[in-house]
Every structure is written in C-alpha cells, then in structure tokens.
Image (cartoon, rainbow, N blue to C red):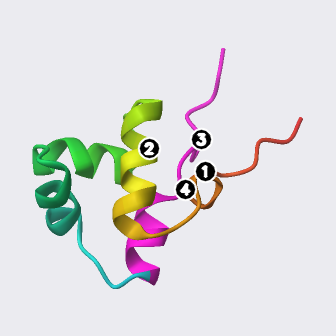
Amino acid sequence: MAENKDINRIKVVLAEKKRTNKWLAEQLHKDPATVSKWCTNSAQPGLETLVEIAKVLDVELSDLLNAIKK
C-alpha cells in the first residue's frame, strides 16, 4: 500500500514566492479548500492544473514536484 508522501511542493513554492493559498485559489478560480488540500498533500491537482499553477507562479513544472526515489 502506498504511503501518504509529499508528492507536490506547491506549499513550498508559494512560500518562496511569498504568495498565499488564497491568492493561488483566486488566480486559478478554484475553491480555497481545494488549494489547501493540495498544499497539505491530502489531495493532488491534475496534470493540466499543475501546468496552470506553474504558469501562474512562473516556475518550471518540475519545481512543483518532489523527486520520487525507490
């Protein structure tokens, strides 16, 4: 069974950019609760949404993801 790991780095990148969950939710026209779930890694955005987040934050898509090592 897969462990609940930190798959995305959205929270970290938001902090680096000095932006809030609420700001990101407004930019993406998403519910702030949804963005909060992404930031705590209790839910994951779809690939298209990740691309949109990368554009809004002006970062590479890979910057939003943690490396997965076996």
Of all residues shown, which one is farthest toward the top? 1
Residue type beneath disc 2: Leu
Classed neighbour count for the residue bearing mark 1: other residues with Cα under 10 Å, few (<14), some (14–19), many (≥20): some
For the residues marked 3 and 4, what is the alpha-carbon distance in whole angstroms? Answer: 14 Å
What residue would you read off at disc 1?
A: 65
Residue 6 vs 22, above or below: the answer is above
**Quick check: can you spot residue 18?**
yes
Q: Are marks 1 and 4 in contact (CB under 8 Å)?
A: yes
Residue type beneath disc 4: Leu
Q: Looking at the picture, how far across and down is residue 51, in whole percent?
A: 45, 45
Residue type beneath disc 3: Lys
For the residues marked 2 and 4, what is the alpha-carbon distance in whole angstroms? Answer: 8 Å
- The residue that appears at 11% across and 59% down in the rendered structure is 26
Q: Secondary structure at mark 4?
A: helix
Residue 3 vs 41, above or below: the answer is above
State the extent of the magenta-drawn residues as a range. Answer: 1-16
Q: Secondary structure at mark 3?
A: loop
What residue would you read off at disc 2?
A: 50
Residue 16 vs 64, above or below: the answer is below
What residue would you read off at disc 3?
A: 5
Q: Are marks 1 and 2 in contact (CB under 8 Å)?
A: yes
Q: Earlier in the sequence, mark 1 or mark 2?
A: 2
Q: Secondary structure at mark 1?
A: loop
